[in-house]
Image: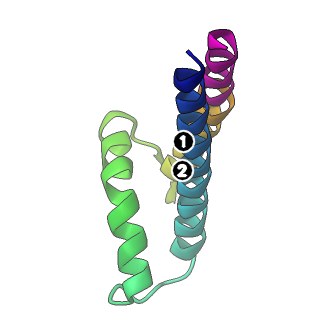
Amino acid sequence: MFILSNFIKSIATILHILLNLYMWVFIIRALISWVSPDPYNPIVRFLYNITDPVMDRVRRYLPLNFGGIDLTPMVIILVLIFLDSFLIPSLYELAARLT
């Protein structure tokens, strides 16, 4: 059981890092959208390619465009914060119970 506990802790740590990294990618994407970025810039294309699939899916179910302001990144960031604050401690608690 000790090995499974360490495995779950490792998964929780990696998931925590990935959720935080993805949250910062959305923050950077939202900040870049306030200026008119060059769509051929490789960094801008990377940010759009990594965030557009999630944003398109959220936009399909929740039209969050009010007065020309797209609130989709804010909703996604809130969901990522919720997952980070709920899922990660739950995984750590599960790992603690297995020891």
Whether the magenta-drawn stretch holds residue 95 is answered as: yes
Q: Nearer the viewer, residue 2 or 16?
A: 2
Is the image coloured rainbow, by chain, by secondary structure, or in one colour?
rainbow
Look at mark 1 in the image and give the residue it sits on: 15
Residue 58, percent from left and from top: 38, 41
Relative image position of residue 55 (x, y in whole percent) = 38, 50
The residue carrying pointer 2 sits among few (fewer than 14), some (14 to 19) or many (20 or more) residues within 10 Å by Cα, namely some
Q: Is residue 95 above or below residue 76?
A: above
How many labels sit on residues?
2
Q: Is residue 30 above or below residue 77?
A: below
Report the amino acid beneath label 2: Leu
Using the rendered view, name the quadrant where residue 82 is placed: top right
Residue 83 location, quadrant: top right
> Residue visible at 61% across and 60% down?
24
Q: Is 54 a magenta residue?
A: no
Rendered residue at 54%/25% (across/down): 3
Q: Residue at x 64, y 39 (%)?
A: 81
Quarter containing the N terminus? top right
Q: Is residue 26 above or below residue 96?
A: below
Instruction: Look at mark 2 in the image and give the residue it sits on.
Output: 18
